[in-house]
Image: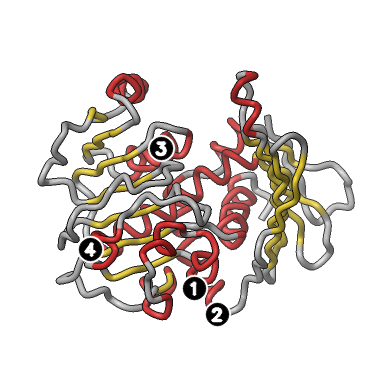
Amino acid sequence: MTTPLNPATPSPSLGVCDPMATAAALPFAALVTAIEAAAQEYQDGGIISPERLVVPMGPGGVMLSMPATSHDIGIHKLVTVQPGNAALQRPTIHGIVTVCAAETGQPLCLLDGPELTGRRTAAVSLVAIRRLLGHAPKQVLIVGTGVQSRHHVKALQALYPDCAVWVRGTSSARAQAFCAEFAATGRVLVCPTEIPAAVDAVITLTTATQPVYDEPARVGRVIVGVGAFKPEMAEIGKTTLDGSVLYADDPAGARHEAGDLMRAGVQWEAVRSLATLLREEPDRSRAFVFKSVGTGAWDLAAARVALQSQGIA
């Protein structure tokens, strides 16, 4: 449910969005536009998004604190990750995003953290794919069958309904079950052993510790790495990386979190930002890899969309 709040009133009540309401408040088309604006604002220093704070919590779990501020609003995303929840058939990740007015500090609304994160992450991927390809994707391979993969399929179906989506999982059965979830909404198919030649984008969304994609770099096929977010993780192999021009949504964060880039020994000064990609036309005679590690700036961009959707901003 959602309860709107007029920021001009002193009422202490909050607009509170559960996962369903958060999703409704974050349409993908608006998210893409907001991410594009925030990327340039972030690079110019208009959004402040410090490195996330990670605190141990419980048996093997962590609590993560991620604030970001700009001229209009401030946000704080508080997330807990408890791997032991899987055995209890409970979600591994919980979280909330608090949105405040910058001028007064007044809390404006609460958003569901996992839903916001999933949708804004998918929006970042689609910004990069469209910009690097120079056209709408026609066939996309999704590697992974988890929560982030679902958000990416939903984003592709919302923005590019004619796009065919191929899926690879840790097993054929997992891939088939995943595809069945989307059978009624578009072409979502189990990927054959050989990747179809017409695939023009590959999105890896796993927690792999060994590369799940290490093909020779190919002009006209954009590779987006999303899932590897720790130094010990790696989704994209050195063969692909060495032959590609490299971009990252947040190059500074990638130095500490992008395990596949770290393992490949990339030259960090050559890794270009999302803002650079939006400002400068890429050389499409080259192959591209885009690494997404996330930043509070994207959460802030999503919060702006949610406020507008609720009539608060």
Labels 3 & 1 near each other (Cβ < 8 A): no
| Residue 89 sits above or below residue 278 on the image | above
Q: Which mark is residue 134?
A: 4
The kind of residue on which mark 1 rests is Gln
Q: Is residue 312 left or right of residue 23?
A: right
Q: How many marks?
A: 4
Given residues 284 and 212, the one toward you in this image is: 212
The C terminus, quarter of image: bottom right
The kind of residue on which mark 4 rests is Gly
Labels 1 & 2 near each other (Cβ < 8 A): yes
Distance between mark 4 and mark 3 Cα atoms:
23 Å
Earlier residue among tags 3 and 2: 2
Q: Position of residue 307 (x, y in %)?
A: 64, 50
| Residue 287 sits above or below residue 45 on the image | above
Earlier residue among tags 2 and 4: 2
The kind of residue on which mark 3 rests is Ser
| Element at label 2 | loop
Q: Residue at x 83, y 61 (%)?
A: 105
